[in-house]
């Protein structure tokens, strides 16, 4: 069986909650929310929950790498 981009494995995380993003990025809650407010870290809202996609985390890390190279 081939896996296409639309196939999902049950163990794959689709959305991270803020504590998960804090752990992954090794950042405090206030820094995560500041990055979201500034538009540097994309998020979505489901009800009252703020959620972050794996792609948004990858993009944010790439942004940090670009900024580090430019400095």
Image: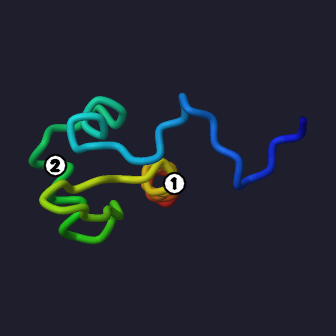
The crowd level at tag 1 (other Cα within 10 Å; few <14, some 14-19, many 20+) is few
- 69 or 28, which is in the foreground? 28
Say above or below: 40 vs 61: below
Extreme-right residue of the structure:
1
- In the rendered image, residue 23, in percent from the top left (x then y), is placed at 28, 29
Closer to the camera in the image, 62 or 66: 62
Of badges 2 and 1, nearer the viewer stands 1
Residue marked by disc 2: 31
Q: Residue at x 34, y 37 (%)?
A: 25
Labels 2 and 1 touching (C-beta < 8 A): no
- Residue at the image point whose x is 52% and y is 57% from the top: 66
Split into 4 quadrants, where in the image is the C terminus? Answer: bottom left
Q: Is residue 30 left or right of residue 53?
A: left
Judging depth in this view, the residue of 19 and 36 nearest the camera is: 19
Q: CA distance from mark 2 to mark 1?
A: 19 Å
Q: Badge 2 local density, few (<14 within 10 Å), some, or many (20+)?
A: few
Left or right, 36 with respect to 65, comes to left
The residue positioned 25% from the left and 36% from the top of the image is: 22
Tag 1's secondary structure?
helix
Q: Which mark is residue 5?
A: none
Query: At which x and y percent is residue 39?
Result: 29, 71
Height in image: 27 above or below 39? above
For the residue labelled by badge 2, is the local secondary structure a helix, a strand or a loop?
helix
Q: Quadrant of the N terminus?
A: top right
Tell me: residue 67, above or below residue 20.
below
Horizontal placement of 45 versus 7: left or right?
Answer: left
| Label whose residue precedes the other's in the sequence (2 or 1) | 2
Q: Which residue is mark 1?
A: 55
């Amino acid at each position: 069986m081939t896996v296409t981009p639309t196939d999902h494995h049950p163990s794959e995380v689709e959305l991270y909650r803020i504590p998960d993003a804090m752990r992954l990025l090794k950042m405090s809650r206030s820094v995560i929310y500041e990055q979201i407010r500034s538009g540097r870290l994309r998020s979505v809202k489901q009800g009252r929950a703020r959620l972050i996609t794996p792609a948004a985390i990858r993009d944010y890390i790439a942004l940090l790498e670009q900024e580090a190279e430019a400095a």
